[in-house]
Image (cartoon, rainbow, N blue to C red):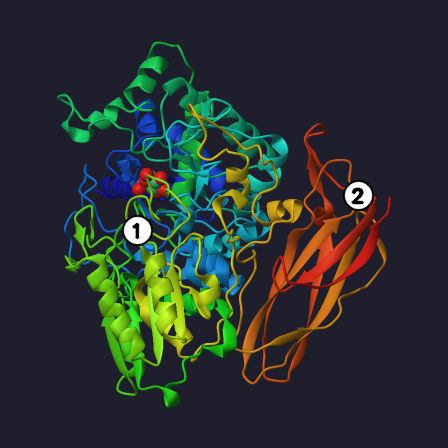
Amino acid sequence: MLQKLRTITILLLGISFSAFSQNKYAVYLDDTKPIDERVEDALARMTLEEKVAMCHAQSKFSSAGVPRLGIPDFWMTDGPHGIRPEVLWDEWSQAGWTNDSCIAFPALTCLAATWNKDMSLLYGQSIGEEARYRNKNVLLGPGVNIYRSPLNGRNFEYMGEDPYLAGQMVVPYIKGVQQNGVAACVKHFALNNQETDRYSVNVNVDDRALYEIYLPAFKAAVQEGEAWAIMGAYNRYKNQQACHNQYLLKDILRDEWGFDGVVIADWGGTHNTREAIFNGLDMEFGTWTDGLKTGTSNAYDNYYLANPYLELIRKGEVGTKELDQKARNILRLAFRTTMNKNKPYGSFGTHAHALAGRKIAEEGIVLLKNKNNVLPIDLSKTKKIAVIGENAIKMMTVGGGSSSLKAKYEVSPLEGIKNRIGNEAEVVFARGYVGDPGGSYNGVETGQNLTDNRSLDELLREALEVAKTSDYVIFVGGLNKSNFQDSEGADRKGLELPYHQDKVISELAKVNKHLIVVNISGNAVAMPWIQQVPAIVQGWFLGTESGNALAAILLGDVNPSGKLPFTFPVKLEDNSAHSVGEFPGKDGQVNYKEDIFVGYRWNDKQNIKPLFGFGHGLSYTTFEYGKVTADKKEMTTSDKITFTVSVKNTGHREGSEIVQLYISDLKSSLPRPAKELKDFGKLTLQPGETKTLSFTIDNTALSFFDDVKHAWISEPGDFEAIIGASSINLKSKIGFKLIK
Ligand code: BGC
């Protein structure tokens, strides 16, 4: 009996010991172990089929984990302005959930216009919390494709024309998102600068423009932001699809930058199994098979990286080295996100997120013009305000393509203005023009009925009537999220405002001297009426709290401090891509002949005065800049140099000023832009207050990409540090030398 008991005890001990040891030695589950050890351990336990299953979608927005090992499925969501509503398993249309209405944050153009990295962090944290709450582990955003032409339908989703500004602003967004155990998937890598022929257009760009203009924001996202995911673009480069492009994904992203995250294909961007295997794609999404409806079995099995991949391996035509590498990258994503036990729980649709969005919106709105201080509106002298224009009432969170949202609520400009003014003055509305009365996207309906069958003359007559008898006229127009406007899938057809708005604006200007034009857009527009209109505000797509943010600026509760992240050209031909006749290209080819001269770099080179320069933005107060000084006259390539400038608030109210540092290389062996943004800062000053701002730069700010040497180099010689309130409002400069 005793012997029996002893045996049982030993057996039990043995069982529990082996359970314990199994637990202990399941390295992939042990989060005290380094991530790469866990990856190798999990990889060693996986079958060939399990590895392949992870490399492609299983639904519109998900891919398989490893159920047998407790590794959860991967769930993606757009991005980049809010969490997309739930869609059906195999359809684009929304699933009709009633608990997936998100907070819509301002578009990324607005975020860039804050020039404030704290706002970018706040944005990332807030949207990351929303994604986390909804159990998404990859947020498809942010986007940092460079603003090459004002016609690109997707510019509103990106961060402007300057690689340095975009690179600085993208990093905190990524960090904020990833603090939530959600991967930021930076998109669209790379050279996706137009929507026309987007699936196939081949971009011909030389290495200088590639490295100096189109890549730096992605590089910052990878190296400084430590992004866990990146999305391959639709277009081609060197005649190879960007989603499986050996130059972009292998040579640059992995080998030069050391990216250790996952490469996710844009939806439908994968076209070839072998290239996808060998050229660095990890996860295939959105390929245009017919989803679950094709054939007798799951059509996702027909994806390029699904059965066709398995068959090649089984036939011995390709090995498993690349597959293991893909699986490693994907497992790393799992350990960083779904398998991270310490991640927070997130929160969704909260008041705090709405207020974060509002704060970003208020900081990003740009006061473009304010003749005779028409703004802010002085309610003490106001009986009646006319609000005119379709964009005063149109919901902008629905539409525009994949960034379309189902917002919990959206305050329109008219509502915001009315909320703010209450009964302090009368607010009347007239439509002025009819643009697009529609409002639905993939089954999400705005619920607004904006149909209006009156003729343009009738609408104009009504608008002029109310304008004549009002103290102020606020015209809220611009673009919208419909096709050929600020929308994915097509580019704009011209720089002008659509729907006869130019006529409405110039007629309004004739009858009321206090005309304020609010341009809602993510793109520059032509303003042939600029001389007639005293006040112009760049309003962006501002999300949930749009109207409240706009009203706060118009009424002066908030002093505007945003500055433009891209140039407004007077006419299309003033933009470099159009000037060289290379937008959107021909016969499937687009040649970036303007080279590195994109945005203000082109204006400087050609001496073209823009309508509004890059970095421009006014305030309700005024600032006086001191003279810039430097802490040394010469520096070596291993030195740093610091420039200091003082700024005084010379007006009567608190305000913030974005101070910009440009560097000019006075003589170089290769052509260089006249000046380039290399640092910036934002100062908040009380009336009469003076503060100083210092910028410290090193050799990187002096360097350019030498395409023959394939390296960043700087050349000894004379440089200038230029302080500007914008790229065309330069305040002072100081020379310095780079010595050997
Ligand atoms: C867009 C991506 C988006 C994806 C998923 C694509 O059409 O280009 O930006 O993330 O769809 O919706």
Q: Which residue is mark 2?
A: 667
Please tell me in which quarter of the rendered image ligand 1 is found: top left
Q: Amino acid at mark 2?
A: Lys
Rendered location of residue 450, percent (x, y): 17, 59
Which of the pair 712/156 is nearer the observer?
Answer: 156
Rendered location of residue 20, percent (x, y): 36, 44
Q: Badge 2 local density, few (<14 within 10 Å), some, or many (20+)?
A: few
- The reply to whether residue 341 is in sight is yes
Q: Is residue 634 left or right of residue 173?
A: right
Rendered location of residue 400, percent (x, y): 30, 48
> How far is mark 1 from mark 2, CA to CA?
45 Å
> Where 301 sits versus 522, above or below?
above
Which of the pair 533/35 is nearer the observer?
Answer: 533
- Residue 208 image-quadrant placement: top right
Q: Badge 1 local density, few (<14 within 10 Å), some, or many (20+)?
A: many
Q: Which residue is mark 1?
A: 481
- Which secondary structure lies at badge 2? loop
Which of the pair 330/288 is nearer the observer?
Answer: 288
Q: Image point 38% across, 42% down: which residue?
A: 334
Which of the pair 102/441 is nearer the observer?
Answer: 441
Rendered location of residue 530, percent (x, y): 46, 62
